[in-house]
Structures are given as structure tokens and as C-alpha cells.
Amino acid sequence: MTTTVRTTTLEVYVHDGAEWQYDTTAYAVSCSFGFDQRFAEATVRRTGGGLIAVNYWSPVEIKLGCTPGAGAATRFKGYVVPVENAVYPIDSVLTCKGVLYRAQWVRNQTPGGTVLAEPPTGAPDEAQVQAILTACAVPYTAGNIAGTGKALGSEFFDFDNPTVPGPFTWGEGASGLDYIEQLDAVSVPDDASGRFRTFETLGGDVFRIPMATAPAATPDFSFTEGVDVLEARLTRDPAGAANRVTVTGAPTPLGGSVPGVEGLDVYRFTAGTSAAPYLPPGLPNGPDGYPALTATFASPLIEKALVVDPDVAGDVLSCEAVAAFLLQEHNAVLDTLEFATPRDDLLGPGQTIHLHSPRLAVTDPDQHYWLQRLEITLDERGAFTQKLTCLRRS
Amino acid sequence: MPRATFAGVTFDFLLDGLQDTHEGMATVREIPSGPGDAYVDLGGPLLARRSVTIRVDSEADYRTLAALPGTAASSGPLTSAAEGAPRDAVLLSVARTWRRGTGAQLCRTEWVFP
């Protein structure tokens, strides 16, 4: 029997336009990060107010933690967005959003939109993302924004609509983050090992790295029922699973033919497998000779059908690679593990988590989970809790 | 019986029944289904509170004190021989039971020491 006694700390700093100010009125906070949300969010509960000049877009930094433990570590960096503030006589809430919120908030003001890639040279996806981040004044380090390196946009031409702006155009009035997310959705390298995703860390740094819903072989952190888990729940749901994925891309040249591709209108590739134990018995065979459930994905940003395509010379994204990646993601039952811990580790989305829980029948030492979402709270009495939502394909 | 003064009112401090309370923000969470491990999070101290019966000399003194809670005037120095040096205090509440006459009377009071 072990009792861990620790002191909890909360420090909220707001930049009032001149310098950082320590907010003495903050008494509780909740921060959330995850690949299921577009940007980080935080709420700061305060009593009183008026001591610090809090303005729209005031930078905010939240440090919290436990001693012994990580101490007052930075858990959120972003901006105060007070439009949703609710103020009652002695209590107020600051709603804060992460640095990527700027990209969601900023809409392109260029008449006719901004062409980010076009023939014959095109532009890599990482360069396009950096251009958007720059235009939206999102702070980033160029070395943290990676990508496929392919010459996106170098092959696109819509023969039916030659005067219409191509898909590699950040449309007038469109949100910067919308364009980034469209680009992220197709940024799959030829080996289909992952898909690039733009996200922000707890420290407010923006990264773009390839990811898949797959834990690593070695967990970053391990938790044990009865030792450091307050509550836990495991859900296994086959909804959304598919053992066949069809990806369609940009229009093909009018009248052209693409070997191995169904139809002539757009580039297309279908990946499938008969290995799908989650399928209910008795389903009839599909077009490939085995029972199949098909998921579809379409994006004009994909400019060829095959990774090695005899009809497209350019180094652009292929339907084949995207389909192969999506098949890995879809052809599985998704286990969703949610649990809360009082532990003060510096967790973050994308990490590999291990849980040992006999009550949930999770006892395999090699069975790990991918951390999708993290919520960190320090309540009004100073209790520190981290809530994890983890995924695993099985 | 020690006399005390607060907000210009002088009254008797009844030491009998006086209660000082010192609490802090501490959250105890026991980990379920284990050997009994627990986490105790210490969120900081709370203000010291005092509950004490006083005897005011008149109905006017009672009304003066009763008008204070929740106003800026409820915060100020409490001067008492029993306390030694004057001590900053906030009068949180004054309560009395119904009585027929006026004059000296007993009141239950709650204080917090910032």
C-alpha cells in the first residue's frame, strides 16, 4: 500500500500586450489535445478579474503539475479567445485555443484565391502547408513541417474545366486550416507507412509528421489497474470497418486509358483483402471473389492511379498508396480505451501507452495503445488528473 | 470576560464555545481494485475560520454588526485583549435567536482571518 502525497501547482500567464502577467485569479484549468480535434483547447476558471488586461488574441501560457512529479510544466500555449466567456459576479471562464486556431480563423483575402501549386513544377505538400501557416501568422519551425516531398500539382489538368481554378488553390474566403486538412488527408508517401498530419504539441509547437493509428513496439508509458488508474473503459466497435477501399483522384486526360484502373473519368485504385474476421457470416462474395465491405475516399489532389504509373511521369500522390494506407486503417476493429490517472507524466497524443487491467481483460504485455486524445485537469480543489483516450486496431 | 472591538462596536468575546478551524484544499483519491494505493493532492491552505459567541451591549450595536457581512466594512481590524495585537478579520455572519426585548444579547458570529 503506497500513498503518494504531492503538492499541485497552477500558473497561468497572460500577455497583456507589454509583458507576461501572472494571473493570480486562476484557480482551475482544463487543457485538451488530440487528433480528434483541430487544435488544442483550454479553459481557465478565475475568480474576480480585472487585474490583467485580457484582450482578444492575448497570448496565454498554462503551467501545471505536481511536486514530486513534472512540477509546473507547460501544458498549453495559445491565445485567449474571449468571445465565449461567461462572466458571473465572482467567477469567469477564459476560453483559450491553441496556435493552430489562427489558421482556422484566418480566411484567404486574395481575390480569386491563392494558387499554391500548378504545372509544370508543382510544389511539395510541406511547402504548401508552410505557406499557409506563414500567411495565417502561425509560428512554426520549418524543420518541423515535413511532407512527402512530391511535386503536387505538377500533373493536374481538368480538361473539362480548364478555366476553373485547380484544387491546389487556397480559395478566397477559405480557412487556412481547411486547406491544410485537405492536404493532410492525402499526404501519403509511396510506401503507405503513414499519413502526414499537422498538429500542435502541449508546448505550442506545430509539427507535421507521418502517422498511423498504430502504437510502437515499446510503450512510452505504462499504467496498471489498482496502482495508478482511477477509472477505465474499453470499447470494441466494428462500425466503420472495411476490407476494401476505393480511392478516386483527379480527372484523367480526356479519352485516356490507365492500365489497372476502373473507368476513364478519374484516377482510381481499389485495395482489398479477404482477411476480415470482423465481418458477419453469410455475406455474399463481392467483386473480388470474397465478402467485402467497401469504404470510399475521393480527392482531386491525388494525380495518378498507381505508385509506378505508366501514364503519369510526375512524382505526385497516387490513389494506390492512399488506398493501401486507408486499408490498414479501416480493415480492423477499433478498440477505444479511455482511462483516467492521477499520474503527472508529460503525456502527449501520438505516444504509445500500455495498460495492464485484468478487469478489462487487457493483460497481454505486448498489447499497446496509440494515444489519440489527452485531457489534463486541475480542479478547484487542486486535484490533478489526466484523462487518456487511446486507440488500437485489432 | 475579554472585551473586543470591531467596526466601532465593542462587545464581549465568549471564550466558551469559541472554535477555530484550519482547513486546506486536499483531495484524497484511493485507487480502486488494488492494494490500497492512494494519491493525496495538496492544493494549498484555506483561510482560518472562527466561530464564536459574542454579547453585544445594545440593539443598536447588534444592528451595526448585522449590517456588515458582505460589505466592504466587514473587513477590518479586530481588537481584543484576548488576541493581543489587533488582527485583520472579516465578519462573515451574525446570527441571534428571536428575543422579545432589546439591550445586551448573545449572537453567534463567524469570522475569517485573511
Image (cartoon, coloured by chain):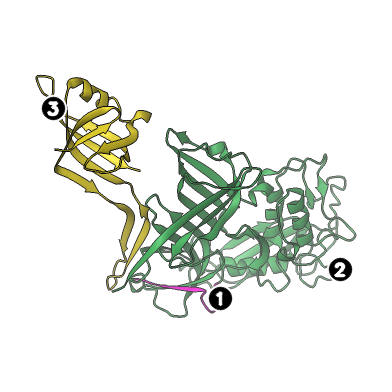
Chain colours: A green, B yellow
Residue A333 visible to the viewer: no
Query: In percent of the image, x 47 and y 57: which residue is there?
Result: A376
User: Is A365 drawn above or below residue A39 in the view shown?
Assistant: below
Crowding at dot 1, Cα within 10 Å, few <14 / some 14-19 / many 20+, comes out as: some
Question: In the image, is residue A265 above or below residue A194?
Answer: above
Q: At x 42% / y 59%, what residue is drawn?
A: A8
> Disc 2 vs disc 3: which is toward the camera?
3
Specify the principal SS of the magenta part.
loop
Residue drawn at point x = 23 percent, y = 22 percent: B63
**Which residues make up the magenta segment?**
A215-225
Q: Amino acid at mark 2?
A: Ala
Amino acid found under the numbered disc labelled 1? Ala
The residue tagged 2 is A313
Label 1–label 3 contact, CB within 8 A:
no
Q: Which residue is mark 3?
A: B105
User: Left or right of A232: which side holds A306?
Assistant: right
Q: Position of residue A35 (x, y in %)?
A: 57, 59
Tell us which disc is closer to us: 1 or 3. Answer: 3
Q: Residues within 10 Å of mark 3 (few under 14, many from 20)?
A: some
* Residue A216 shown in magenta: yes
Q: How would you rate the neighbour count of disc 2 (Cα within 10 Å): few for under 14, some for 14-19, many for 20 or more?
A: few
Position above or below: A208 against A170: below
Does residue B56 appear to the left or right of A337 in the view shown? Answer: left
Identify residue for label 1: A216
- Picture coordinates of residue A212 (x, y %)? 60, 68
Q: Secondary structure at mark 1?
A: loop
Image position, residue A352 (x, y; %): 52, 71
